[in-house]
Structure formats: structure tokens, C-alpha cells
Image (cartoon, rainbow, N blue to C red):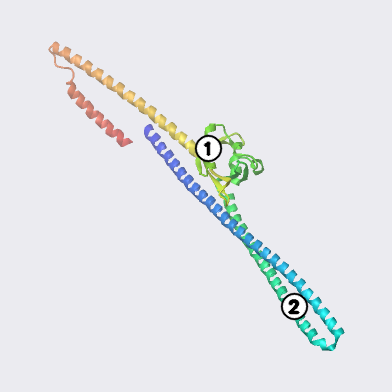
Amino acid sequence: MKIAELQTQLDKAQATVDVLQEELAETNRGLVALALELEKRVDERTAELRAAHEELQKTNSELMRMTLELDDRVTQRTDELNAANEVLRQSRIAALNMMEDAIAAQERIEQANAALQREVGQRKQAEQEIRQLNAELERRVQERTLELSKLSRATEESPAIVFITDKNGTIEYVNPKFVQATGYAIDEAMGQTPRLLKSGIHPREFYETMWKTILSGESWHGELCNRRKTGELYWESASISSLRNTEGIITHFVCVKEDISERKRAEEVLREAHELLQRQAADLKAFNQAMVDREQRIIEMKEEVNALCQELGREPEYPPVWKERQNEECRMQNWDRGRRTED
């Protein structure tokens, strides 16, 4: 019965481990998908902002060119006006017969004014287009800010431990779950490196392999034993991924972790139960061998008694050995069937 109870406990512990592993895998998949979606959206919005900025620069350049051209034309028209006025003055002084020349000069002045008005209108239109572009750029910035705010809230409310570091490992962001799990406040973690949590359990080669993996651009997955601020050791299942800029250069690392201390304790209980089961099986095997040896000795003693009875001319005290063995085998089979029924 103890073996059956231990086997039941072993099955329950194994079921607990399977459930925890499934939940962990689902959480990791969701968080990795969230990190990839965040990176994708940031890249898209950055590209849009860069395109808008380039368009704005082009518009500013065009406006400057138009302004310079307008200034040149205004200067030109001013010179023409001055020349026309001079002609008009000379015409009035010279004689009435120069009136036609004065009228022609006046027409040129009107044409210059009309051209000037057209240039002014074009300049106002360009200014209106710039204002529209600025409004569109501001709208896009607000939309991107709103999307980033949504992603930030999702990270803040995530049940997983999340923190972000720069390429050198300096912590730049931690979510509330990090504070809850480690005991370190946000201002205590900012500017530090993950060595703040180092437990001393893992060898140096363990961390070298981790850094080699993530610096190559690949994701690292594994289990870590870290130390809380209180000094307590705890186990985490971690996934570390890299973030790249538009040039494809790694700039940051995102670490998503889950506290698996309970799972580790369940695995330890399972291991101890398995060891206990093995020890009891060994004890049972030794007991069975002792019983077999005892039965063999009894059979030998019975055969000796039967041999003495035969020498004395008496009937054997015990049935033949083969028959007793057959009866013993029947008893053992009946006992084994009863034990299986109880189990």
C-alpha cells in the first residue's frame, strides 16, 4: 500500500510538472510574440517618421528656394518700377508727346505688380502646405505615442518578469513583476546590471555561453538560479532576445522570465519519491531472496527427515518435494493475485 501511495504521489507531482511546463511554454510564446510585435511596430513607426521628416526637409528646401527666387523677382520688379518712374519723370519733363511712352511704362508696372501678387500667393500656398504637413506629422506622432502606451501597459501588467538592458547589460527598464519577484525597487535596479541578482550557483562558462548566444543575434532560453534582495535563492525560466535598430545593429536586450521555484520544489519531491521507491524495491527484492533461501532450507530439512524415516522403515513425514513446491507455487500465485487486486 505504501508503494501504491507513493506511486499516486509520484503521478500527481508529474501532472503538476506537466501543467507548469505547458503554462510556461504558453507564457513564453505570448511574450516573445509581444516583443516581436513591439519591435515590428517601432520599426514601422520609425520609418514613417523618417519619411515624414525627409518630406518636411524637402518642403523646407523648396520653400527657401522659392523665397530666394521671390526676393530676386521683387528686386527685379523694384528696379523695373524705378526705371519706369524715371521714364515717367523724364516723359513729363520732356513733353506731352512722350505720354505714350509713359503709358507703356505704367502697363509694365501693372504687369510687375500682378506678377508680384502671384508670387505672394504662391508663397502663402507653400506656407499652408507646410502647416498641413506639420499637422499630419503631429497626428502620426500622437498615434505612435498611443500605440507605444498600449504596449507599455501590456508589459507593466504582464505576469512575467520583464526587464530591458542596453548592449552592455545596463538595466534601462523593469516591470512591476521584477520588483515583486526580486525585492529590488525600480530606482535600485536602474543603471545596474543583471549581476545584481547573481547567485553564484552557475559557473563562469554558463554566463559566457549566454552572452555569446545573444550577442550573435540569437535568442537564449534556459533556467537560472538567482538571489533576491533578501538573500533567498529562487529559480527562473528565462528567455533573452535582442533588439536591432534600422541598420540591423543590436542596441538592446529584452529578458522575459518566470519564477519556477515551485516547479523545482515539485521536481525535488518527485526525485526523492523515486529514490525512496527504488530503495523499497531493493529491500523487497532482498526480502524475497531471503524467503526463497529459507524455503529452500526447509525443503532440504524435510528431505533429510523423509530419508531418516525411510531408513527406519517408516512412512515419510512430509509429502514429496515436487508436490509441496507445486502447492507453494499455487499459494504464491493466489497471494500475488490478491496483492494486485488490492493495488
Residue where numbered disc 2 is placed: 112
Q: Residues within 10 Å of mark 2 (few under 14, many from 20)?
A: some
Secondary structure of residue under mark 2: helix
Residue 129 in view in this figure? yes
Q: Say whether residue 222 is left or right of residue 187.
A: left
The answer to whether 338 is drawn above or below residue 91 in the figure is above
Residue where numbered disc 1 is placed: 224
Determine which quarter of the picture holds residue 342: top left
Q: Say whether residue 188 is left or right of residue 222.
A: right
Which badge, 2 or 1, comes first in the chain's sequence? Answer: 2
Secondary structure of residue under mark 1: strand
The answer to whether 229 is drawn above or below residue 24 in the figure is above
Under mark 1, the amino acid is Leu
Report the mark closest to the observer, 2 or 1: 2
Q: Report x, y in % for residue 88.
A: 83, 82
Residue closest to the eye, 337 or 20: 20
